[in-house]
């Protein structure tokens, strides 16, 4: 749930944006992190652990624990607590280790 | 890129160091991986006191604003959304914008990288809905998102009590505070009584036995001294204490000492806040976990020492200012923390750990 009126800071959620999680649209606000915006929409499971495939979500919210990895706009293993939402952002849960090898450009 | 002073971390400590150096004409660069200056102050809505005599008591985010105000018009370049990831052979910092890495050559470096929260392990503690108290605070005060509807808090430090009150203020029902010791660890008893008055039970000598839920926490079992109770909650906030963030100090090859009162392993430094790497200074929670007033003072001392090294201020004047600030530090800082700091300084010339990696 978004906090529309904060007890100390008042109304701060002024600029709505639309983000896409698993191709479904959700409402977020411009200053929110991706992890927070998803949690506001009831999505707490942001990915799974690599070995035991357990659910993972936001844990430290300051970029230290890497529990919140997601695939954001085509990039894998992005810390969703440190990434601010953008209108039209496409977000997928982190289901496995990313493919780090890449083709050598042949030109 | 070149700069006189590179400050790593734009929290209260880094900002106060920036004010001291830039106001004396030095060219300063602040790098921070967050998207705004202010560090952890940005989500602190509680009133901070005591602060150094130059500041009135004010809320955390107001202090951030006040500090940022003071660097306006000075030669301070903030590099936000940028992270220090290592150092080049010539001592330049390797800074990334997450796409490219570039070197920044500085005459002096001040590391004010802050603190990280420690976890409290219990069965299934990694389940979504279980987070640090700091994370819950960030959600409600920075992102304006409810962290949960029904919560318990594990631990009872001042920071935990503060977070419990802030959660309640946005409408989260705090169902219990669970403490493994026989009494609260918070020093400020006022908040503790306020929470009790609000009917929140404190379970002492207790811990979380088990967590259940389908992909996210739904129910917990709490082991009390003589029974096990079950609560339905969707949020568990844990308060495992904090420790200095040391990555950058490892990369710089600084030596460390272990000081329980300062949060564990802490880089060694002298009373000028200079580390054993001559060009590297330290400030803030990275130099030992403390409260905001003292943290500002450490940033000011480090800033004055760097200004002295770069001849922006005379040594006699620098010594005098440092002496005054140390006195104030002794007054503002919790007794145990201050004495831990003094003990830590004494080990400067005989560090426990040198050229080793600790984890
Ligand atoms: C989420 C959270 C909430 C907190 N809330 C409270 C509270 O309510 N009350 C309280 O007393 N204390 C609280 N604290 C403790 C907090 O650490 C201090 O209040 C204070 O902000 C510390 O100041 P600092 O300048 O030392 O560090 P910080 O404010 O943490 O600033 C350090 C900055 O350095 C940056 N950084 C670190 N490493 C790098 C790198 N390699 N490259 C680039 N940038 C880097 C970080 O992004 C950060 O912005 C909280 C801590 C956390 C983590
Ligand atoms: S929640 Fe810890 S890195 Fe994002």
Image (cartoon, coloured by chain):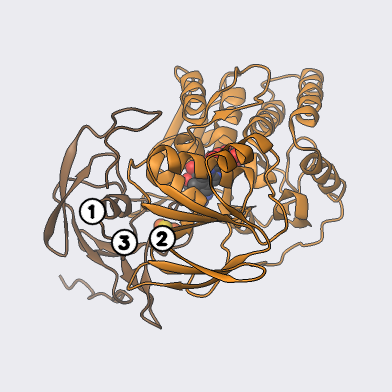
Element at badge 3?
Answer: loop
Tell me: A87 left or right of B17: left
| Front residue of A85 and B99 | A85
Image point (66%, 21%), residue name: B312
Q: Nearer the viewer, mark 2 or mark 3?
A: 2
Q: Which residue is mark 1?
A: A41
Label ID, residue B278 = none
Q: Is residue B214 visible?
A: yes
Label ID, residue A44 = 3
Image point (53%, 45%), residue name: B199
Question: Up-down: is B211 above or below A9?
Answer: below
Q: Colour of chain A?
A: brown
CA–CA distance in space, label 1 to label 2: 18 Å
Q: Position of residue B188 (x, y in %)?
A: 67, 37
| Front residue of A8 and B302 | A8
Q: Give the class, few, some or many, for how many residues have Cα within 10 Å of label 2's Cα (few <14, many ≥20).
A: many
Subunit ID for the residue under disc 2: B
Ligand 2 appears in which quadrant?
bottom left
């Amino acid at each position: 749930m978004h906090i529309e009126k904060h007890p100390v800071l008042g109304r701060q959620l002024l600029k709505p944006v639309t983000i896409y999680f698993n191709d479904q649209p959700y409402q977020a606000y411009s200053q929110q992190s991706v992890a927070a915006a998803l949690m506001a929409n009831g999505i707490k499971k942001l990915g799974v652990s690599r070995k035991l495939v357990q659910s993972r979500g936001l844990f430290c919210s300051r970029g230290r624990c890497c529990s919140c990895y997601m695939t954001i706009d085509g990039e894998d293993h992005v810390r969703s607590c440190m990434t601010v939402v953008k209108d039209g952002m496409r977000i997928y849960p982190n289901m496995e280790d990313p493919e780090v090898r890449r083709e050598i450009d042949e030109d | 890129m070149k700069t006189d002073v590179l400050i790593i971390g734009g929290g209260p400590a880094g900002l106060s160091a920036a004010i001291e150096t830039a106001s004396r004409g030095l060219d300063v660069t602040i790098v921070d991986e967050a998207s705004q200056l202010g560090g952890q102050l940005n989500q602190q809505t509680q009133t901070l006191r005591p602060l150094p005599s130059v500041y009135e008591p004010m809320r955390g985010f107001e202090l951030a604003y006040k500090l940022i105000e003071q660097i306006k018009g000075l030669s301070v370049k903030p590099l936000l959304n940028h992270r220090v990831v290592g150092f080049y052979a010539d001592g330049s910092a390797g800074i990334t914008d997450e796409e490219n890495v570039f070197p920044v050559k500085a005459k002096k470096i001040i590391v004010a990288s802050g603190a990280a929260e420690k976890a409290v392990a219990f069965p299934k503690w990694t389940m979504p809905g279980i987070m640090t108290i700091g994370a819950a605070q960030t959600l409600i005060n920075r992102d304006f998102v409810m962290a949960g509807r029904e919560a318990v808090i594990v631990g009872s430090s001042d920071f935990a009590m503060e977070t419990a009150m802030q959660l309640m203020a946005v409408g989260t029902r705090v169902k219990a505070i669970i403490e493994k010791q026989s009494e609260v660890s918070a020093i400020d008893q006022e908040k503790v009584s306020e929470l009790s008055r609000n009917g929140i039970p404190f379970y002492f000598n207790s811990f979380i036995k088990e967590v259940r839920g389908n992909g996210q926490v739904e129910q917990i079992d709490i082991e009390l001294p003589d029974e096990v109770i079950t609560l339905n909650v969707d949020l568990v906030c844990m308060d495992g204490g904090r420790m200095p963030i040391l990555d950058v100090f490892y990369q710089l090859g600084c030596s460390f000492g272990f000081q329980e009162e300062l949060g564990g392993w802490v880089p060694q430094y002298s009373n000028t806040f200079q580390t054993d790497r001559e060009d590297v200074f330290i400030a803030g929670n990275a130099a030992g976990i403390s409260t905001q007033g003292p943290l500002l003072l450490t940033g000011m001392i480090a800033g004055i020492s760097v200004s002295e090294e770069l001849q922006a201020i005379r040594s006699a004047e620098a010594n005098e200012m440092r002496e005054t600030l140390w006195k104030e530090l002794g007054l503002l800082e919790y007794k145990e923390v201050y004495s831990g700091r003094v003990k830590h300084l004494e080990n400067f010339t005989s560090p426990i750990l040198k050229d080793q990696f600790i984890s």
